[in-house]
Image (cartoon, helix red, strand yellow):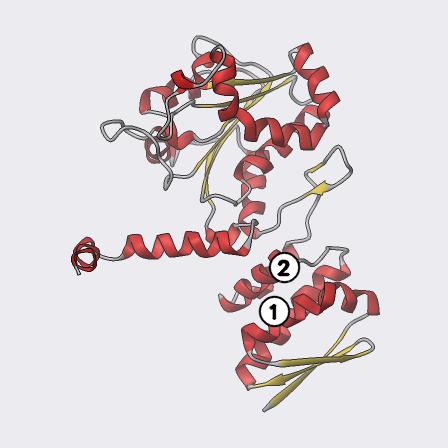
Amino acid sequence: MTERIINAERIEQIINVFGSLDENIKHIEQTYQVKITNRGTELKISGEEESADKAARAIEGLLTLAAKGEPIDEQKVRYIINLVSTGNDDKISQMAKDVVCVTAKGKPIKAKTLGQQRYLKAILKNTITVGVGPAGTGKTYLAVAAAVSAFREKTVNRIILTRPAVEAGERLGFLPGDLQNKVDPYLRPLYDALYDMLGAETYQKYLERGNIEVAPLAYMRGRTLDDSFIILDEAQNTTREQMKMFLTRLGFGSKIVITGDVTQIDLPADKVCGLKDAVRVLENVPDIAICRLTASDVVRHALVQRIIEAYESAEKKPAAQQNYKRKK
């Protein structure tokens, strides 16, 4: 049995790290099978040597973030534990970075993982950024935050959000209303992100002025988009031809962000995925960044991360082994 002693600068940091009903500390105790007690600003960790060392590194990382004013929640604790497990806890101090955007309700938006930080840096630095990763990694939300930030700073005059209206097992023709009514459900995640950043009234005002446009990908054909921040969401459902069409809409003073998850393709089997093809073709083109987010960058419910990891694990198993299990 080994003991590790950690001293915090202020009691407020300890309170932040412990969380509501000590849920954060309980999570660390369960993960590393250690016992954590505190007296004032002193924390004592008891357990097997390796486990106590890892728990101490995780708590020190959380205290570092707390000292910088970062709120400590379950997702952050899980991510710190992952960094410690992979030997990357020296990078924890990099996580408390600048705010990208502030929502209509005053909530600061910033990267929550190192992968998200690289993604935002790529957006700022490059004219075209491709963000590929599983659900819950903040690809679309952070892209919209970057777009709103650029719009507020007047580096662009318009925000254009688009996505392909690809049917996922349902028929658009059966939905009520005209074409716009039929495609609105596909654009709902983009509306939601903009409402969050701008507020409903401000969003509506900019929409009426033409500063914001949310439209299906088909509406982009034949246009040249100058001084705009353009986001193509759900790009895994574009064909090779659609992707080429979209990329060539780029005008002067504009930025493009393309987001997608190649594990959720709804295209017919005979169609080439435009996102996969673009990543292959554009990998080494200057001023174009390809950012790959992983399950460790998921910032939704903990179960989402486990689901993604389970599917990735299943896909790595040989097809013959999977078929054998089905027959049994």
Residue 23 quadrant: bottom right
Residue toward you, 74 or 148: 74
Question: What amino acid is found at the position of numbered circle 2 in the picture?
Answer: Glu
Question: What amino acid is found at the position of numbered circle 1 in the picture?
Answer: His
One can see residue 172 in this view = yes
What residue is pinned by disc 1?
27
What residue is pinned by disc 2?
74
Q: Residue furthest top?
A: 222
Q: Residue at x 60, y 81 (%)?
A: 34
Residue toward you, 147 or 165: 165
- Residue at mark 2 to residue at mark 1: CA–CA distance: 8 Å
Mark 1: secondary structure: helix
Up/down of 101 relative to 88, above or below: above
Say which quadrant the N terminus sits in.
Answer: bottom right
One can see residue 250 in this view = no
User: Measured from the top left, where is residue 291 in percent x and y?
Assistant: 47, 41
User: Measured from the top left, where is residue 270 in percent x and y?
Assistant: 22, 28
Up/down of 27 relative to 121, above or below: below
